[in-house]
């Protein structure tokens, strides 16, 4: 069963602070054409069911080394090397301790611990210096990925990123003021108690502010939209020579310094 209590707790966490931080969610500031009421879920799902999740590609230097087997791309990174998938979705969020259901036809199920950026005010053509003003706070996301769907089914990464039960967030939304340095947070992920991923947000090639600014140059982000930012090394895809994919019964635990922890059990597909 979905972990609705955990999901609701995440959404309503520190509600008194969010009343101020997410003031743009008030009916008086609503976007024309959208619902006049933000609803009880503080913008995570609008009344019409819409919402955006933006997924960054490999944006950590140590993760890129893993992808390229030690051969990092030539030359310095440039702004336009930020790649992303816009996952506009019509579904509720997945709780931090919900089961992860293996999709039908899946053969290469993987995990990715990531820090997620939660948008707090309308973000449209932001300036670099003001980009963080649009951020409400941060949370953990397990960017669960089906690598066969992602890379071997026509080249559209979204196919391997948006399946049912993928992308659990929470357990908390931690506001900006509670994080001393968002670019210096330890990250970890284990499978069945075995160490898999260890990293730190300091290895991000592009920082949080740059990512938010850059995304706003291409599409409008609304309060409650989420940007996931890339993962450190240690994913199954990077294992040589034989990746160890997730299977039924596996338990994935993950966390980020100051943002809490998650736990998911991998379960078989069910109708």
Image (cartoon, rainbow, N blue to C red):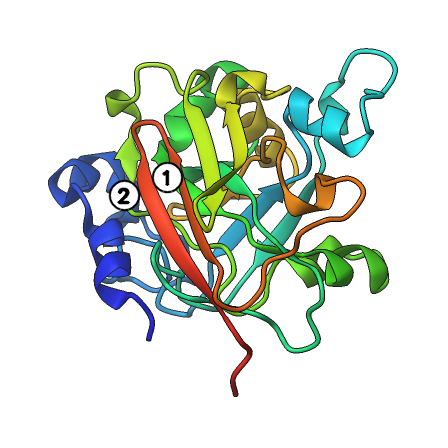
- Can residue 206 be spotted in the picture? yes
In the picture of the structure, the residue carrying the numbered disc 1 is 139
Disc on the earlier residue, 2 or 1: 1
Residue 91 in the image: above or below residue 54: below
- Can residue 38 be spotted in the picture? no
Residue drawn at 52 percent across, 60 percent down: 166
Residue drawn at 81 percent across, 20 percent down: 72
Looking at the image, which is closer to me, 139 or 31? 139
Q: Quadrant of residue 241?
A: top right
Q: Quadrant of residue 155?
A: bottom right
Residue 197 in the image: above or below residue 33: above
Residue 100 in the image: above or below residue 14: below
Q: Position of residue 253 (x, y in %)?
A: 41, 47
For mark 2, does the 10 Å Cα neighbourhood hold few (<14), some (14 to 19), or many (20 or more) residues? many
Q: Position of residue 259 (x, y in %)?
A: 31, 34
Name the secondary structure under disc 2.
loop
- Spatial separation of the CA atoms under disc 2 and disc 1: 6 Å
In the picture of the structure, the residue carrying the numbered disc 2 is 172
Looking at the image, which is closer to me, 193 or 184? 193
Q: Position of residue 88 (x, y in %)?
A: 57, 58
Q: Position of residue 153 (x, y in %)?
A: 83, 65
**The N terminus sits in image quarter:** bottom left
Does residue 242 appear to the left or right of 31 in the view shown? Answer: right
Q: Residue furthest bottom?
A: 271
Q: Residue furthest left?
A: 16
Whether pointer 2 and pointer 1 mark residues with C-beta atoms closer than 8 Å, the reply is yes
Does residue 238 appear to the left or right of 23 in the view shown? Answer: right
Residue 26 in the image: above or below residue 200: below
């Amino acid at each position: 069963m979905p972990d609705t209590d955990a999901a609701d707790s995440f959404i309503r966490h520190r509600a008194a602070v969010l009343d101020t931080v997410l003031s743009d969610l008030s009916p008086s500031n609503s976007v024309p054409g959208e619902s006049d009421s933000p609803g009880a879920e503080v913008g995570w799902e609008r009344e019409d069911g819409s919402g955006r999740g933006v997924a960054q590609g490999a944006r950590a230097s140590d993760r890129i080394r893993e992808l390229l087997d030690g051969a990092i791309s030539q030359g310095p990174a440039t702004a336009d090397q930020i790649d992303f998938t816009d996952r506009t979705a019509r579904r509720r969020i997945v709780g931090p301790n919900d089961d992860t259901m293996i999709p039908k036809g899946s053969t290469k199920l993987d995990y990715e611990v990531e820090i997620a950026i939660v948008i707090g005010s309308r973000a449209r053509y932001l300036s670099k210096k003001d980009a963080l003003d649009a951020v409400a706070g941060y949370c953990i996301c397990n960017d669960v990925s089906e690598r066969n769907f992602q890379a071997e089914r026509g080249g559209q990464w979204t196919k391997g990123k948006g399946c049912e039960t993928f992308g659990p967030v929470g357990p908390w939304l931690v506001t900006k003021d509670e994080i001393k340095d968002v670019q210096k947070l330890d990250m970890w992920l284990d499978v069945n108690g075995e160490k898999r991923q260890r990293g730190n947000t300091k290895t991000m090639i592009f920082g949080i502010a740059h990512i938010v600014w850059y995304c706003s140059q291409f599409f409008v982000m609304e309060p409650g939209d989420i940007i996931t930012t890339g993962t450190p090394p240690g994913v199954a895809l990077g294992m040589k020579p034989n990746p160890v994919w997730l299977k039924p019964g596996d338990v994935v635990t993950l966390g980020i310094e100051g943002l809490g922890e998650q736990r998911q059990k991998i379960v078989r597909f069910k109708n």
